[in-house]
Image (spheres, rainbow, N blue to C red):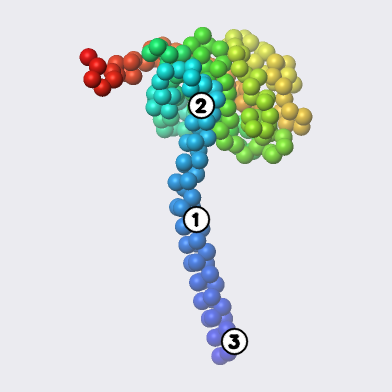
Amino acid sequence: MEMFTAIRNSAVGLSIFAVITSGAIALTQVSTKDQIMVNEREARAKALYEIVPRESIDNNLLEDTYTVSAAELTGTDGPSDAFLARLGGQVITVILPVTAPDGYTGKINMIVGINADESIAGVRVLAHKETPGLGDKVELKKSDWVLNFNGQRYEGDKDPSWAVKKDGGRFDQFTGATITPRAVVNATARAIHYFREHKTALLENREKLTQQPAGAE
């Protein structure tokens, strides 16, 4: 009888512990979800204006967007926002959301800024799970490697130099880590392909151009 009572008490105790633990995990996930989204938006805004400085354009980069639905580019089946930088009403740079699916430890979420003349305005890595001290050097706060894309041009599939140096290209890889920079280089190339295929729609997006300030005729 005493043994039965002990087993029952243990079972009840474990059940209560499981319920409390599950509740705590669920509560933590819910309570941190909004903050994570806020942090991601802030990081994206910071990265956008690193690529296109505020003083160089005359529109709000965060509010002037173009819907992109290209799973091969964004890694999702749903729509994503591309950001349009304008000067004098004309789109001068398009910043595309890009996902590299082939990072060393998973997906690498990035943004790629492409100028109207098809040169690269900048590349930034927003989120990844790459190895600290090795693959994480694709982050600007870890190294300036990503700045090597600035002003670069990609001549298309017949441009063998658009690769890391280990593959015969122009971009450095990291000591002990080639997969991560290779993934970023390839993803940037996909962004340029997309830009060229949709250049007219991206640069001549006139939806925002038709908007007039309040009170204007």
Cα distance in 3D space between marks 1 and 2: 30 Å
Q: Which residue is mark 1?
A: 28
**Residue 160 in sight:** yes
In the rendered structure, the answer to whether residue 84 lies left or right of residue 161 reads left
Q: Decide which of 110, 189 is in the foreground and name it.
A: 110
Q: Decide which of 76, 92 is in the foreground and name it.
A: 92
Q: Residue 136 location in percent, x, y?
A: 67, 34
Q: Disc number at residue 3?
A: 3
Is residue 6 positioned above or below 207 on the image? below
Asked if marks 2 and 3 touch (Cβ < 8 Å), the reply is no
Which mark is nearer the camera, 2 or 3?
Answer: 2
Q: Decide which of 152, 73 is in the foreground and name it.
A: 152
The tally of labels here is: 3
Q: Which residue is mark 2?
A: 48
Which mark is nearer the camera, 1 or 2?
Answer: 2
**Three-letter amino acid code of the residue under disc 1:** Thr
